[in-house]
Image (tube, helix red, strand yellow):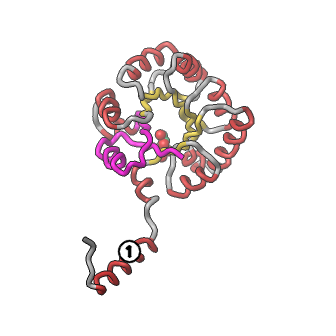
Amino acid sequence: MKFFADTADIAEIRDLAETGLLDGVTTNPSLIHKAGRDFIETVREITSFVSGPVSAEVVALDHDEMMREAEVLRRIADNVTIKVPLTPDGLKTCAKLSGEGTMVNVTLCFSAAQALLAAKAGATFISPFVGRHDDIGFNGMELIADIRLIYDNYDFATQILVASVRHPMHVVDAAKLGADVMTAPPKIIHQLFKHPLTDSGIAGFLKDWEASGQRIG
Ligand code: G3P
């Protein structure tokens, strides 16, 4: 499973990149607003040290304007992935960009039917929002299972990118279902390391090591 960081905060992304576990980055207009920096400059800086896909989202709603914005964004770097909303114009833009060899992430997916459409439009990634699905009383993981089944039935190459991840179990459940990628806020990626028995185990080993009076090297 690939790990993407769902943030536009450069310091957080650099910190995760140093772990060697980071495969890419996703941003959206809300995350750019939260980071408080220029959109283009932020994406450029991320691509200067992240070699995997870096999603940058168009904000236009019609195809022609989406294409114009995508042109500006994909000029930043080869690994910029254009993020488009799951609308008829978004999928038209997806098909065009994919045909030109540009990676596309189709976002705001809330149904298996929408995911099927995105795969047919040649999306590189489909982003089902599991947390927001849970928020309205549905089961986000059932959506992931349905998409996995459909994509496998037809050998679609579109990668399932689980988004709106809210806690570590979303990551584990998505991995069990065979999702290709998950994108999560850095805080959640750091939470994946945590287990109280790891902490108490280290404390116990260190105490006994100190009592042994030995040192390494
Ligand atoms: O990338 C978009 C997505 O991950 C949003 O997450 O927590 O705002 O639903 P959230």
Span shown in magenta: 1-30
Name the residue: 51% across, 57% down.
Answer: 168
Name the residue: 41% across, 33% down.
Answer: 29
Name the residue: 42% across, 45% down.
Answer: 22
- Does residue 177 appear to the left or right of 45 in the view shown? right
Seen in the picture, residue 166 relative to 115 is either above or below; the reply is below
Residue 34 in the image, given as x and y percentages of width and height: 34, 41
Seen in the picture, residue 23 relative to 38 is either above or below; the reply is below
User: Residue 155 sits in which quadrant?
Assistant: top right
Residue 192 in the image, given as x and y percentages of width and height: 46, 59
Name the residue: 59% across, 39% down.
Answer: 160
Q: Is mark 1 within 8 Å of ligand 1?
A: no
- Does residue 14 appear to the left or right of 169 in the view shown? left
**How would you rate the neighbour count of disc 1 (Cα within 10 Å): few for under 14, some for 14-19, many for 20 or more?**
few
Q: Residue furthest right?
A: 153
Comparing 43 with 51, the one in front is 51
Residue 49 in the image, given as x and y percentages of width and height: 32, 37
Seen in the picture, residue 71 relative to 176 is either above or below; the reply is above
> Is 10 covered by the magenta stretch?
yes
> Is 153 covered by the magenta stretch?
no
Seen in the picture, residue 163 relative to 44 is either above or below; the reply is below
Comparing 139 with 145, the one in front is 145
Please, what is the three-letter code of the amino acid marked with disc 1? Ile
User: Residue 203 sits in which quadrant?
Assistant: bottom left
Residue 12 in the image, given as x and y percentages of width and height: 33, 47
Q: Residue furthest front?
A: 217
- Residue at the spot of label 1: 202
